[in-house]
Amino acid sequence: MLVEGKCSDGYHRALFYTLGISRETRSHIRDLYDFSNGGIKPEGLSAPWQTGSTIRVCRLAFNLWNGWTEAGGERYSTPHELFDCSYAPYFFEAIRLRYPEYCRSHERTIKRLAEQIR
């Protein structure tokens, strides 16, 4: 997807990683991203194949892409709503991909704490 999207910056890496978490979103990527214009397709959220979990995947991906939230439905893009699914562990990686400059020190802290526990 990154090759086809012709970009490998943090925005694209986070978007395509997140949309790739679910088999359903992977197989319907063209419903969610316009490769010719290089933009997200929020109307894909209402596609009939969407489930509660895939909608969460898409909302996080779109938000990491450009801060998108659904007008009138902003509360559905809160961590409380988004992380309430089995994909939550993968969502943390998506955030690290989008914001690597803020996650480096956090990774070092986790490693240091893990070593102290041993």
Image (cartoon, rainbow, N blue to C red):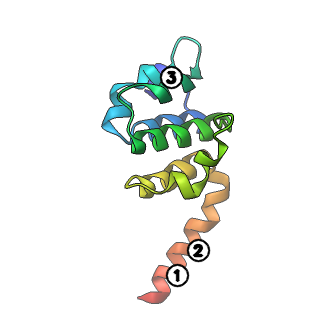
| 22 with respect to 67 (left or right) | left
Residue 91 on image: x %, y %: 48, 52
Name the residue located 53 percent from the left edge and 73 percent from the top edge: 110
Towards the viewer: 34 or 45: 45
Q: Which residue is drawn at 54% across and 39% down?
A: 59
Quadrant where the C terminus is found in the figure: bottom left
Q: Position of residue 48 (x, y in %)?
A: 37, 26
Numbered label attached to residue 33: 3
Is residue 48 depicted above or below 115 in this figure? Answer: above
Most extreme residue toward the top is 36
What mark, if any, has residue 109 been given in the picture?
A: 2
At label 3, counting other C-alpha atoms closer than 10 Å, the crowd grade (few under 14, some 14-19, many 20 or more) is many
Image quadrant of residue 107? Answer: bottom right
Question: Is residue 9 visible to us here?
Answer: no
Judged from the image, the secondary structure of the residue bearing numbered disc 3 is strand
Local crowd size for mark 1, using a 10 Å CA cut-off: few (<14), some (14–19), many (≥20): few
Instruction: Mark 1 or mark 3: name the one nearer the start of the chain.
Output: 3
Q: Is residue 84 visible?
A: yes
Judged from this view, the residue extending furthest toward the front is 72
Determine the CA span between mark 1 and mark 3: 39 Å
Residue type at mark 1: give it. Answer: Leu
Labels 2 & 1 near each other (Cβ < 8 A)? yes
Q: Looking at the image, is 10 positioned above or below residue 116?
A: above
Looking at the rendered structure, the secondary structure element under dot 2 is helix
**Figure check: 87 above or below 109:** above
Residue shown at 61%/41% (left/top)?
64
Disc 3 versus disc 2: distance between alpha carbons? Answer: 35 Å
Q: Which residue is drawn at 58% across and 35% down?
A: 62
x, y percentage for residue 80?
A: 56, 58
Q: In which quarter of the image is the N terminus?
A: top left
Residue that numbered label 1 is attached to:
113
Residue 79 location, x and y as percent?
Answer: 58, 56
